Image (cartoon, grey):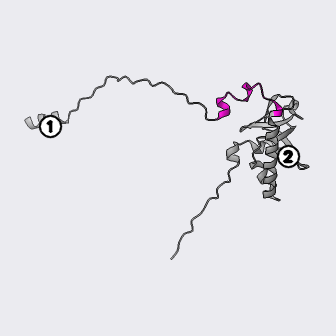
Amino acid sequence: MAELDQYAEKSVKIFNFEKQRRRERPIRRRAPENLLRRAGGLKRCADLRYDQFTSLYRLWLSYFKKVLEQLGQRIDERLLRVDYHGALLRVADAPNKTQIGLHGIVLHESKSTFQMITKRNRLIVIAKEDAVFQFVVDGKLFTLFGNAMRQRTHLRGRKAKMPTTIPFLLN
């Protein structure tokens, strides 16, 4: 019996069932990594002028001409992968009929919108959904469908990896 009591004492553990206080940690908010969002977006920049961005448009034109030279005849599929920051776009069709005919230089492109500055120094936000955009380069009219571009710009530019299959080895 003494052996049994001794064995029982060794196997019994002491548990503390009282609730322990957890230290509350302060929630740390990180600053947005996007410099545009960190600054509060383009809406807070009231002193933007169209003249400031004409050099950006000329830079974009030279970029797009180089892209056209490289593409040759395969323009359709690659047109969606081009960066449109600095492009002079015109809204050809949109669900909001008041936006049709507006044009400006693209300052910011997000997943679902283009933010453009017009010649009247107005910042406008155009939704890509169900909208049609046009631009002209070297006398050629290019048409973009907003639904095809409703993707993050950095994801749209990546080339999808082809799934590779490993053949079975037979002896």
Position of 165 compared to 24: left or right? Answer: right
Label 2: state its secondary structure: strand
Q: Is residue 20 visible?
A: yes
Amino acid under disc 1: Tyr
**What residue lies at 61% left-to-right and 35% top-to-bottom?**
33
Query: Which residue is rendered at x = 23% and y = 29% of the image?
Result: 14
Q: Which residues are magenta?
A: 34-51
The quadrant where residue 86 appears: top right
Which residue is at the front of the view, 166 or 158? 158
Quarter-of-image position of residue 10:
top left
Check the image and report above or below for 99 versus 79: above
Picture coordinates of residue 12, whole percent (x, y): 20, 33
Say which residue label 2 marks. Answer: 143
Percent of width and height locating residue 21: 37, 22
Q: Nearer the viewer, residue 85 or 78?
A: 85
Measured in 3D between alpha carbons, the distance from the residue under mark 1 to the one under mark 2, in whole angstroms, is: 85 Å
- Whether pointer 1 and pointer 2 mark residues with C-beta atoms closer than 8 Å, the reply is no
Q: Please, which residue is most extreme toward the left here?
A: 2
Is residue 36 rendered magenta in the image? Answer: yes
- What residue appears at the point 79 percent right and 44 percent down from the top-left corner? 59
Position of the N terminus, as image quadrant, is top left
- Which is more toward the observer, 8 or 133? 133
User: Is 132 placed left or right of 43 in the picture?
Assistant: right
